[in-house]
Amino acid sequence: QVQLQESGPGLVKPSQTLSLTCTVSGGSITTSYTAWGWIRQPPGKGLEWMGVIHYDGTTYYSPSLKSRTSISRDTSENQFSLQLESVAPEDTAVYYCARAYNGYDYWGQGTHVTVSS
């Protein structure tokens, strides 16, 4: 059973960089044909796909967030991370990490991040 767990600060000040890490257990982030993504849900809104890192390290980002988003990984720790630069209050959301294999089939429980001074 693959399990994902997000970690990171729950409060970030405007203009700073939001950094989150997803720790994966029960499966490897280098398993062929898997991808590992970040999705967020602002209050009262739907899910927004942010980006993904594939098993081979290739990354893809949402066009609307590409200029501010970076996804990286640490294969020795079986973790992947999200960095979102220059955050604003509208970046307040629950942030999820998830595995994509047959669709997004495994999700973390989500972590709430508030952007506020």
Image (cartoon, rainbow, N blue to C red):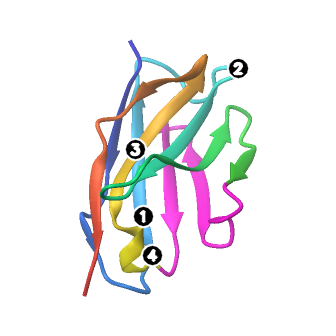
Q: Is residue 11 left or right of residue 2?
A: left
- Residue mark closest to the camera, 3 vs 4: 3
Q: Which residue is mark 2?
A: 32
Placement of 45 over or under 106, stated as above or below: below
Asked whether residue 101 is drawn in magenta, I would say no
Q: Could you give the CA–CA distance between mark 1 and mark 3, rounded to whole angstroms? A: 13 Å
Give the Cα distance between marks 3 and 2: 22 Å
Give the farthest residue toward the front: 44
Near mark 2 (Cα within 10 A), the count class, few <14, some 14-19 or many ≥20, is few
Q: Earlier in the sequence, mark 2 or mark 1?
A: 1
Q: Residues within 10 Å of mark 4 (few under 14, many from 20)?
A: some
Q: Earlier in the sequence, mark 3 or mark 4?
A: 4
* Circle 1/circle 4 CB separation < 8 Å: yes
Q: Nearer the viewer, mark 1 or mark 3?
A: 3
The answer to whether residue 81 is magenta is yes
Q: CA distance from mark 2 to mark 1?
A: 26 Å
In magenta, the rendered stretch is: 62-86
Residue 24: x percent and y percent?
42, 31
Amino acid, disc 3: Tyr
CA separation in Å, label 2 and label 4: 31 Å
Labelled disc at residue 17: 4
Amino acid type, mark 1: Ser
Task: Identify the disc placed on residue 96.
Answer: 3
Instruction: Name the secondary structure under disc 3.
Output: strand
Q: Nearer the viewer, mark 2 or mark 4?
A: 4
Residue 70 at x, y = what percent? 61, 61
Q: Amino acid at mark 4?
A: Thr
SS of the residue under disc 1: strand
Q: Are marks 2 and 1 in contact (CB under 8 Å)?
A: no
